[in-house]
Image: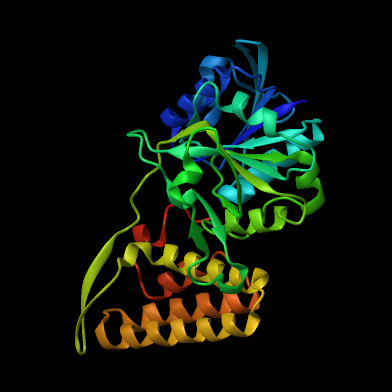
Amino acid sequence: MRIAAVIPAYNKPDLLRLVVRELLRQTAAVDTIYVIDNASREPSALALAEYGLRPDADDPLCSEASAPTPGGVCRIVCTRLAQNAGCPGGFGVGMDMAMKDGHDWLWLLDDDAAPVDTALEKLLPHAAQDVAALASLPRLPDGRLIATHRARCDRAKLYPGFTIPLAEEDYRPGKVRDLDLAAWAGLFVNAAAAKAVGLPMAPLFLTYCDLEYCLRLAAYGPLRLVTDSLLIHHMDEGYKDRVRCKGLFGTGEFTARRHLWRTFFITRNAIWVGGRYTTRKLRHYLTVARIFLGTAKKILLYADDRRLRLRLAWRATADGLFGRFDNAAPWRILAASEAAPEERGADRPD
């Protein structure tokens, strides 16, 4: 069995080094590590220069080296993209490379999610050919469980809630539990399943791309949580910037202006994924209409920047309903409102 790890990297060089170091310490062998540099400010090849990564003479955006592991030697391949393709785009590039190189299982890891040394060893006994994917158990560095990253779904009621938390006993040591959702970090994908259902959907920039891919993988076989396989996720718990705005009829709490582009992608992607995979289409469309009208009412009564917020909310809702994936749209709308450059987002995909 040949195993590849795939890591999209974006502006976290210290954590990327940690993740690669932990992969090289695995008690079960990782054959190749594919680092997909999403146009980071510091090229990931430089961040990993200690492993001897050097640009390829025929392709200056690709670097390759080898590093020792407890079981032998691991190949490290770093490919730099011309622009930020987000997690799904980065994973898609790396998965495609890994499958073309003949790997059987693909371990998807964020650039801030470090597996403990036995994580892969604990996954392998459950890597049956009829299984679509396995998932490690994610915890924060302080030991807290990241429960939202592993969940079940009710396809009759996907939007807006999507997930059903697992029971506490599902996280006990030694458990193997069926899932509907596993966030990217620590998802161990059967290459046969990836070939059958395709690569992650790159236009789903930022969010809900992992849910969409898990729902697609379910057409091949089960997705299972292996609680003995542990992953430490040094995730940023930010992006919860809320402000109180003074409107025509009082004050209300809203997303800060500099994060409105995030709200756009969250809204659009959630509506599209919900509509694509729900078993109750009419309920979904009625729910979308109810939530949009409630949001519009709140904006009109209590928000500042009412025109901007309404334009973004309407465009995100319409794009989600009609499956339009113009990822430059929120920044065009913000630019048209004369938003400051820093408000247009450093993580834009175009």
Work out which quarter of the rendered image holds the N terminus and state it.
Answer: top right
Q: Quadrant of residue 241?
A: bottom left
> Quadrant of the image for the C terminus?
bottom right
Q: Position of residue 163 (x, y in %)?
A: 51, 61
Q: Looking at the image, how many numbered discs can be counted on the residues?
A: 0
Q: Position of residue 166 (x, y in %)?
A: 49, 52
Q: Is residue 74 above or below residue 139?
A: above
Tell me residue 327's x, y (percent): 56, 64
Specify the color scheme. rainbow
Q: Is residue 304 above or below residue 136?
A: below
Q: Is 296 displayed left or right of 194 in the figure?
A: left
Q: Position of residue 27 (x, y in %)?
A: 59, 17
Instruction: Please give the name of the residue rendered at 80% of the width and 46% of the height, measured from the top-left corner.
Output: 195
Pick the residue in front: 300 or 173.
173
Residue 167 in view (yes/no): yes
Is residue 4 placed above or below 266 in the rendered structure? above
Say above or below: 71 vs 31: above
Position of 15 with respect to 26 (left or right) is left
Point 46% across, 66% down: residue: 331
Foreground residue, 273 or 77? 273
Task: Tell which of 161 and 243 is nearer to you.
Answer: 161
Q: Tell me the quarter of the picture where residue 63 sits.
A: top right
Left-right relation of 295 to 105: left
Write down the quadrant of residue 323 in the picture.
Answer: bottom right
* Residue 43 appears in view: no
Q: Residue at x 67, y 12 (%)?
A: 73
The foreground one among 26 and 163 is 163
